[in-house]
Image (cartoon, rainbow, N blue to C red):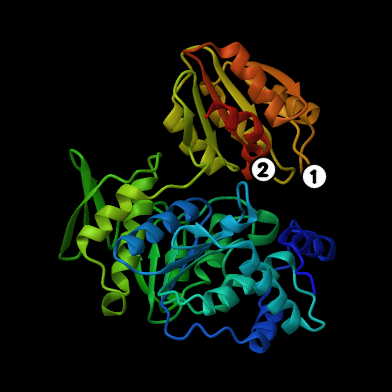
Amino acid sequence: MTPVPLAAWLEKLERRSPEARVDLGLGRVQRVRQRLKPALGNVPVITVAGTNGKGSTVAYLEAIFRAAGYRVMAYTSPHLLRFAERIRIDANPAANPEIVWALEAVEAARENEALTYFEHVTLAALALAARSAIEVLILEVGLGGRLDAVNVVDPDVAIVTSIGLDHTEWLGRTRRAIGREKAGIARPGRPLIVGERRLPRGFLVDLQATDADLQIIGKDFRTRRRDRGFRLYQGRLNIDLPLPTLAGDCQLDNAACAVLAARALGDRCPVATEALAAGLSSASVPGRQEVIQDRPLVIVDVAHNTAAARQLAKTLGPSSGASFAVFAALADKNAGAMARILDDCFDVWLAASLDGPRGVPAERLAAELAAVPVTGSVEALESAATAVGNALRRCGPNGRVVVFGSFRTVAEAWPELEKLG
């Protein structure tokens, strides 16, 4: 029998249950997992949740354990350019035939269970982890935490990076409600590392109710920036570490969470200070405040909510002239609020359409920007790639082009961006 290509498998999953469909709950995943029986054995598991900062924290953990000599799998979502980016073994995307094998294994165990796209893929990642002789497994939550498919696995260490108002239709309308969902990845007696500096009112009570070994930034651990690095304090522990490679003020907190999580595994996966430092100095995440070119300056960022927009605004600073925003958003995001936060950063807003049912048409997005109103001029273009080309022709060598709004925005702009390489 001719093997089914990965693209055909993904199309099949999309037809059965579109990736955008959300149906939170662990029952279906637990039942299929019992039949699938992916044998993870004693492999340590770290699960990462948070409104923003998940991908960066996973990248630090991945790089730290690789520097320490361990075979690591990281499961993240969504992908930027290739689906295989979601399942990385020793920082390399899994081979397409291996992913197909795992998807087929889940299909055989599924029977009549109506798995969502994300649930099927998550179980496939676990099946692949079980047969890949990995020594550390890092899982990134897709949505929320408590009812997310990755929570079918009991983590040895849980991390909540941040708590913001996003996905409110599924997680709740307040930061406390959203925080409770994220803290649902904690397990009694096991470390729960919290990198959110502004805990929602009453949330500490919710954290204590998990019976986890709480480690909260600003309370149980803290950081202090130094000349070319930072010092991490936790009780009697003082570690001097290099500044993390990733851009953004939040990265010191994300790096601290990753370091503490790696150390929390203790004798099961000993990690020397040298490996911690090497991991922070080598981690990378494509598409997160990534500089593509210096003249003109071209930056891409998958920022897709107000918290991420604030971090991007801090990095960019006010425009000094000829600063172009290439902006495209999904329908469930507050594009106007993001634009309000980033208003001072841009002279020209190029609103672009995104493909697919969740994409906002350029004309509608431009109208939202005009209604804010942003102070720069607003134009509607047919695609993110077209908008990038337009911005590059107009900005001059000393200008700036920033592509942001979602993973899809960066992905759809990529055909034009890769010409710059």
Which of marks 2 and 1 precedes in the sequence? Answer: 1
The percent position of residue 91, horizontal first and vertical second, equals: 45, 58
Judged from the image, the secondary structure of the residue bearing numbered disc 2 is: helix
Amino acid residing under circle 2: Arg
Using residue 121 as the reference point, say whether residue 300 is left or right of it: left
Using residue 214 as the reference point, say whether residue 313 is left or right of it: right
Q: As displayed, is residue 28 above or below residue 374?
A: below
Tag 1 near tag 2, CB within 8 Å:
yes
The percent position of residue 307, horizontal first and vertical second, equals: 52, 43
Judged from the image, the secondary structure of the residue bearing numbered disc 1 is: loop
**Mark identifier at residue 130:** none
C-alpha span from label 1 to label 2: 10 Å
- Where on the picture, by quarter, is residue 351? top right
Residue denoted by label 2: 408
The residue lying at 26 percent from left, 60 percent from top is 275
What number of labels is visible? 2
Residue denoted by label 1: 356
Amino acid residing under circle 1: Gly
Q: As displayed, is residue 322 above or below residue 27?
A: above
The percent position of residue 216, horizontal first and vertical second, equals: 35, 62
Q: Looking at the image, can residue 375 be seen?
A: no
The residue lying at 32 percent from left, 74 percent from top is 265
